[in-house]
Image (spheres, rainbow, N blue to C red):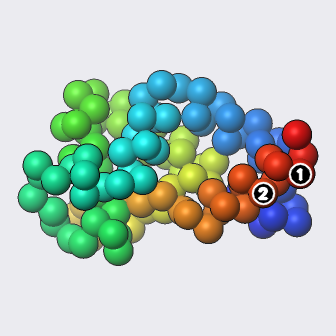
Amino acid sequence: MATTAELDSGDLIEVFKALGNPARLQIMQWLKDPDAHFGEYEPIADRRAVGVCVTHIQAKAGLAQSTVSSYMSTLERAGLVRPTRVGKWTHYRRDEEQLARLAQAIGTTL
């Protein structure tokens, strides 16, 4: 996704498509407070620093691994999450800076 000055309708459409799926929207809501929503899972790494392990997202969502991987890739392409590898595991956290830029762009565009 582009920076604030470069956000255009195509970028916004990509975000809205990503969030138009109820499961992806739910994942974004869970990632807003990872300790509250993933506290029952033993963290592999610091959830605030690197995010939530994709296996924990999969377990909580109750979806197939391939579905969750596809959903997380969609959220990443839309600029909503950032992946971090920890060993063999991928962790995801929200990109709060990009979400703030997105909120600003929505406020000025719509």
Image point (24%, 72%), residue name: 46
Instruction: Give the camera-side residue of 92 and 66.
Output: 92
**Can I make out residue 53 in this image?**
no
| Residue 75 % position (x, y) | 53, 45
Count of numbered badges drawn on the protein: 2
Other-residue count near label 2 (Cα within 10 Å), few / some / many at <14 / 14–19 / ≥20? few
**Can I make out residue 15 in this image?**
yes
| Residue 4 % position (x, y) | 81, 64
| Residue 90 % position (x, y) | 32, 59
Q: Which SS class for mark 2? A: helix
Q: Quadrant of residue 83?
A: bottom left
Which residue does the numbered mark 1 point to in the structure image? Answer: 108
| Residue 50 % position (x, y) | 34, 70
In the picture, the quarter occupied by the C terminus is: top right
Image point (22%, 37%), residue name: 60
Disc 2 marks a residue whose amino acid type is Gln
Marks 2 and 1 in Cβ contact (< 8 Å): yes
Q: Quadrant of residue 87?
A: bottom left
Instruction: Indicate left or right for 2 with 86 as reference.
Output: right
Which residue does the numbered mark 2 point to in the structure image? Answer: 104
Q: Which SS class for mark 1? A: helix
Distance of label 2 from label 1 (alpha carbons): 6 Å
Instruction: Indicate left or right for 99 with 7 as reference.
Output: left
Instruction: Indicate left or right for 18 with 49 as reference.
Output: right
Other-residue count near label 1 (Cα within 10 Å), few / some / many at <14 / 14–19 / ≥20? few
Q: Is residue 56 above or below residue 6?
A: above
In the picture, the quarter occupied by the N terminus is: bottom right
